[in-house]
């Protein structure tokens, strides 16, 4: 199984135009993400999928691989599907381009899970530490069955704790691994009812019978959505450098 790590990097952003090129302690964010992912033991290749020549040039300047993709993709999944026609592989891991601290161990965990469930889509979850996140609709929750496959994703608090029992809530992380055939089938399907209700793309997979394997990680996402988030990441990196 040839595994390709794909980092979508779109130039346009309403809140933060040119975000992939933003400097974090002197390095473009896309370089930091790329270098983190490149430490993976199980990826055969890492590639940035972008819609902007400047991002492509930046990636190539530090020795990375990049491919140009269309500017009109609505989702990262659509961009990944285009990459499957440009970069040969069997399994593609979609890695967020605005998470400069993403651990390569998480990427490897997804690949390991894919080897055990080769026909499934693979994603990740992490225990919710901040109780306020349970009711926050911007934090997507997931529940899984005893075999670790997703039952449901929601912006609501799931499960609803009517019995008042001690329970752990899990946040869904936006990293996915797709078999090539599945990602290409997926982007051709119309949006499903639950997808439109929850505004969560992964319901299109569940509603059409695709299994989603969910691996657990302790990684708590530190993403960059606004220029102010750069400072937060730099502080964390400063602390890590002194450990």
Image: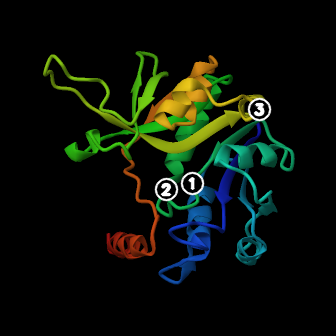
Residue 164 falls left or right of residue 206: left
- Quadrant showing the C terminus: bottom left
Give the mark toward the camera: 3 or 1: 3
Q: Identify residue for label 2.
A: 102
Report, in whole angstroms, how far the alpha carbon at label 3 lies from the one at label 1: 22 Å
Give the mark toward the camera: 2 or 1: 1
Report, in whole angstroms, how far the alpha carbon at label 2 lies from the one at label 1: 9 Å
Tell whether label 1 touches label 2 (CB within 8 Å): yes
Residue 198: which disc?
none
Tell whether label 3 touches label 2 (CB within 8 Å): no
Q: Measuring 16% from the left and 25% from the top, which residue is drawn there?
A: 166
Question: On screen, 194 above or below 123?
Answer: above
Q: Position of residue 7 (x, y in %)?
A: 65, 56
Residue 91 falls left or right of residue 128: right
Residue 188: which disc?
3
Q: Position of residue 212 (x, y in %)?
A: 56, 26
Tell whether label 1 touches label 3 (CB within 8 Å): no
Task: Say which of 114 and 81 sits in front.
Answer: 81
Report, in whole angstroms, how far the alpha carbon at label 2 lies from the one at label 3: 29 Å
Can residue 42 be seen by looking at this rendering? no
User: The residue tagged with tag 2: helix, strand or loop?
Assistant: loop
Q: Position of residue 132 (x, y in %)?
A: 22, 46
Task: Say which of 193 and 205 sits in front.
Answer: 193
Dot placed on the residue nearer the N-terminal end, 3 or 1: 1
User: The residue tagged with tag 1: helix, strand or loop?
Assistant: loop
Can residue 173 be seen by looking at this rendering? yes
Q: Measuring 40% from the left and 15% from the top, which residue is drawn there?
A: 146
Q: Identify residue for label 1.
A: 96
């Amino acid at each position: 199984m040839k595994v390709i790590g794909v980092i979508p990097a779109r130039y346009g952003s309403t809140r933060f135009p040119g975000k992939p090129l933003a400097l974090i302690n002197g390095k473009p964010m896309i370089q930091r993400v790329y270098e983190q992912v490149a430490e993976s033991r199980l990826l055969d290749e890492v590639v940035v999928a972008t819609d902007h020549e400047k991002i492509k040039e930046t990636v190539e300047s530090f020795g990375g691989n990049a491919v140009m993709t269309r500017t009109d993709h609505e989702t990262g999944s659509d961009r990944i599907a285009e990459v499957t026609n440009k970069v040969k592989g069997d399994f593609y891991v979609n890695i967020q381009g605005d998470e400069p601290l993403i651990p390569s161990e998480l990427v490897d965990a997804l690949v390991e899970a894919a080897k055990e469930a080769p026909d499934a889509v693979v994603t990740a979850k992490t225990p919710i530490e901040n109780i306020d996140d349970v009711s926050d609709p911007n934090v997507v929750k997931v529940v899984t069955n005893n075999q670790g496959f997703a039952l449901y994703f929601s912006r609501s608090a799931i499960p609803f704790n009517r019995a008042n029992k001690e329970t752990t809530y899990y946040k869904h992380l936006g990293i996915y691994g797709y078999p090539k055939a599945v990602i290409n089938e997926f982007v051709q399907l119309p949006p499903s009812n639950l997808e439109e209700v929850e505004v969560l793309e992964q319901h299109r997979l569940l509603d059409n019978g695709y299994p989603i394997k969910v691996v657990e990680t302790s990684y708590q996402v530190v993403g960059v959505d606004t220029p102010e988030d750069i400072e937060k990441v730099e502080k964390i990196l400063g602390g890590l450098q002194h450990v």
